[in-house]
Amino acid sequence: MAKMKFLCDEERCIECNACVTACKNEHEVPWGVNRRRVVTLDDGQPGEKSISVACMHCTDAPCQAVCPVDCFYTTDDGVVLHDKDICIGCGYCFYACPFGAPQYPQEGAFGSRGKMDKCTFCAGGPEEDHSHEELEKYGRNRLAEGKLPLCAEMCSTKSLLAGDGDVVSELFRNRVVRRQGRQEAWGWDTAYNVK
Amino acid sequence: MKLTKRNSASNTTKSGVDRRAFIKGSGIAASGAAFMTLLPSAMIQKAQASEKSRHNYDEGDIKKVRSVCSHCSVGCGVVAEVQNGVWIGQEPSFEHPFNLGSHCAKGASLREHGHGDKRLKYPMKKVAGKWQRVSWQQAIEEIGDKMLSIREQSGPDSVYWLGSAKHNNEQAYLFRKFAALWGTNNVDHQARICHSTTVAGVANTWGYGAMTNSYNDIHNAKAVFIIGANPAEAHPVSLQHIFRAKEKGAPIIVVDPRFTRTAAHADQHISIRPGSDVAFVWGMLWHIFKNGWEDQEFIDQRVFGLDDIRKEVAKWTPDEVEHVTGANEAEVLKAAQTMAEHRPGTFIWCMGGTQHTTGNNNTRAYCIFQLVLGNMGVSGGGTNIFRGHDNVQGATDLGVLSHTLPGYYGLSAGAWKHWSSVWDLDYEWVKNRFDQSSYEESGGKAASPMNTKGIPVSRWIDGVLEDKDNIAQNDNVRAMVLWGHAPNSQTRGPEMKSAMEKLDLMVVVDPYPSISAVLSDRQDGLYLLPASTQFETYGSLSSSNRSMQWRDKIIEPLFESKPDHVIMHKFATKLGFADQLFKHIKVNGEEPLIEDITREFNKGMWTIGYTGQTPERMKLQAANLHTFNKTTLLAEGGPCDGEYYGLPWPCWGTADMKHPGTPLLYDTSKSVAEGGLTFRARFGVEHNGENLLAEGSFSAGSEIEDGYPEFTADMLKKLGWWNDLTAQEKTAAEGKNWKTDLSGGIQRVAIKHGCAPFGNAKARAVVWQFPDPVPIHREALYTNRRDLVEKYPTYEDRRSFYRLPTRYGSIQAQDFSKDYPLIMTSGRLVEYEGGGEETRSNPWLAELQQDMFVEINPADANDAGVKHGEQVWVDGPEGGEIKVMAFVTPRVERGVVFMPFHFGGHYQGKDLLDKYPEGTAPYVRGESCNTVFTYGYDSVTQMQETKVSLCRIRAV
Amino acid sequence: MMKVLLLITMMFSLTACYEDTDVTLHQAGEYKGKLDSHSQTAEQREAILAKRFGQVQTDR
């Protein structure tokens, strides 16, 4: 069975924000909710690197473990989803997540927080596939259409990869082998004394 | 870290009442209703804005429509999903050769055009300072009447028709024809302020001024040199292709005053002082000549005038180069050596090189560099010029320019006669549409406005403000039509505001109100006409690599907007020349038939080969994207077998000839019939006794195995090939040349014998018609290197240039460097495009870049006493001042500050929100950097100098 | 009279004890949300998505 994963190849990421915008587009994500963001390290300096981050769909998801109402579940494909009807908007998953994936809309019924929203790996949520409810609450369900997350499909340099972990790592391995000798990877210049 | 799930007894009991139940029991809204308030506001707005909302998700067929992104010139393929006339989804176009499904942030957000929350919805008119909705009928009537009265009082040149790089090809062509039939050359578009110096410099070097290879061809480059360009932000998808070269081992060199995002992925980044490009390139050539790395065979066969260049380059020793540019010997040598040792290498530039008073010098220096290394006409080499807007290439080619007619024919009587014949109009009638007096001399003879270059967009404000006796036309510009063109991309904001206030009439035709609607304090005489975007119409466009693509219509025009060609039809009808404008173009109701317009320009664009790309051929290619090879762009099998994607121009001859397009310019390894080419013989056969024609270099399969001039009817007769023409072709071709023969026979026969119709010459390293025949370094008008001004002065002031007095030396003579010590430069951001109203009105993009800012080096910030994130004033030497956020970063070097030019909607500290028509103010507004950018225009094209000026920063 | 009034008041106040059986009672570690239905099996999806991945990537 497939285990869905993301991989962002930071050698190719140019911080174009296509992934961020594609996600907004596909799911009509409101202002203030950042299902996906590009993080840049050492901005403006040699060694600048960017990487696109969203929910990592952890196998042993901390959000799932700490949720006081257990509104999370993991699908057969390894996608971590949650039921917004059960969610009480406490924000504890945000504490637990190492990646800051849980987001909360700026307007909410219970004061400032509101129901948690996060990247769904474009797999919708616990409503009937392609129903109005699923669309409104969770966004489009691309996996059910046989498509992969739009952020990865639209990445300008094909640095963001999404799919079955094995398939993704196979491709990435090939890529790394093909560009051998050109690595900007950490440690390379230590080993090879490149400038 | 392994977390264990809790399995202890729950805290709630079966019998108790937990919080959820209590709330339900007491009647407060249940979770479903509570959630309604959590619905994204965008969705709620949309439900109100149009009846058709996304709730129709699973009813009705989903149609897939192919189009092309309307943002930049890469021309990424787009697949739109439309259901019940609503644009519900956007899918990647995996098989499209240019982007292979990828997009950047702007491309990924295109569907928002179908929402159009902030669009201009209906025609509006400003009356006594307030916006009033009017009908199309009323608007056109009133505008037309006013224009006709201005025409009578002041002449047709007093109405300025500013067109757009966002027109599709058909609209661009129609627009130029429209301006011609109105009777003026005061027509222009964004290319003027973007790559006009490229086109002039490059075309005058070897014949055509366009990107010579393609984005995909970069896969084959062994080295990639990027100067004055930031493709990671301006052309993100091109990085996909550049990375392919990089991952095969090609070194990337980036020369830029800033450490850009592109530089972050480069092997070598060299920072140079803004405006010192020529010095830097000559510095590299100094090393190349010194080490004998030039390709002497190529130079002997295909380059003219290099000895003069050698003399100039000899002055640029490493010390002088460092003195002028700041780049030291080691880095210059390394760059030169890398390019010399990794051939073929490609050379990329953008605005960093073009937007200077010496822009044409810069572009020619870049070309000469590639000629010296023999990198021209080969796969992986070339000068890959990345153009800006989606169809700036098409609009340039189709002549939406003040100095030429479509196809770069120019404005001579011969050019007008050619186009009059294509338009099937009497030349004398066309001539009489113009002001018959003369104000200028050309070659010792009086020249009338029909044959003199019009005012360019960079100077339109001077057309309004300058004393009318100093302008080479009858009167000032009194009416301004800003059609798909933002005003905040041109310099001298405060003067622009005054110019807008002085006009009799201002008309904005745009999907969004644009800054034009709010910058000035006009109380009336200002009309906003809603135009449709390119997704609400169809037609062809030309991407940067000269490929022509066909867009299909995705949705019907939103609200009351209309496509550009429909609006042109309305104006032409009111202004009285619709019959002539649409003589051979069918008009269905109020919409001119796009395909007829394509066919019309196919009949006349012989100079650059826009003749073979018929609607049928383009549509067939759009339906068979998967058959094109992703590196060579050649269709391998399938219905388009043998053609190159987009039939890149020149696509010679008529469509019957089925020329496949020319993917790489100047490639002699292929026959002309298969897409090969030579350098154009445009400048005569000899100069000062020296041979200008190629020597020993010719296309594969060429029957003339040497250089030859451009083809004329007489030449065909001399060669004995005249009888290869059919009888019909002979009639049309008699006395004509390859550019004016409307049958295409001369081109066909030349190619049949393996020759390029435009000749086979050497590229010129020396352009004797230009102010600087040999490109030299000149200091910018506003420079803080007063020590260099004496040795490298700018030009002398000119009395009349493109109809206007133009200053150079008188400005440079003043020393502003004490009061304005910092060098100011400007550039792009990935989230926004152009003037920015369209992209800042898109919430998905606007959220990513919410503040206008100025990048300051930490040392300069400390000197000025400003901290990161604070508001600061940026003052320009011409009196403009803007209030922006300080972004302290080491990305810019000490002494240089950078600002993006996409913002607008604030003016000198004040938010102009109230001046926007209801519901159209973009989500993000900010100061326009061009409020403080200054006077300075290229010596050949009037390009504005937006890459180097001076400023000072002070804390608020 | 007072007794009847008291009785009515007590009965009325008992209505607050109404328990809505629609309530989802949380049990630790158990997901009580709606079921996520899929029209295909995980294996089918794996094959379809692997093929799609090949289409998306340009390293082909």
Image: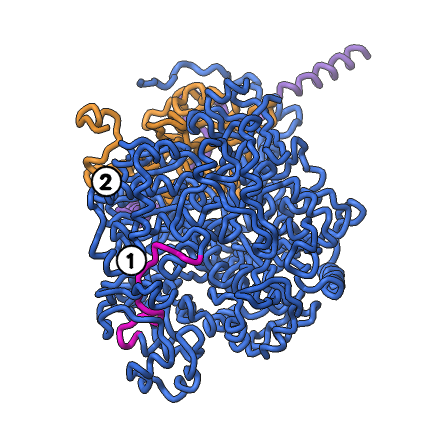
Chain colours: A orange, B blue, C purple
In this view, which residue lies farthest toward the top? C2
Residue B684, compared with residue B299, is above or below; it is below
Question: Label 1 lies in what chain?
Answer: B
Residue A163, compared with residue B187, is above or below; it is above
| Res. B15 in view | yes
* Predominant SS along the magenta part: loop
Question: Label 2 lies in what chain?
Answer: B
Magenta segment, which residues?
B751-769
Front disc: 1 or 2: 1
Indicate the quadrant where residue B433 lies: bottom right
Horizontal side, residue B449 vs residue C4: left or right: left
Q: Position of residue B24 (x, y in %)?
A: 61, 26
Horizontal side, residue A39 vs residue B836: left or right: left
Q: Which residue is mark 1?
A: B303
Q: Position of residue A190 (x, y in %)?
A: 20, 23
Q: Nearer the viewer, residue B235 or B319?
A: B319
Q: Which residue is mark 2?
A: B337
Q: Image quadrant for the C terminus of chain B?
A: top right
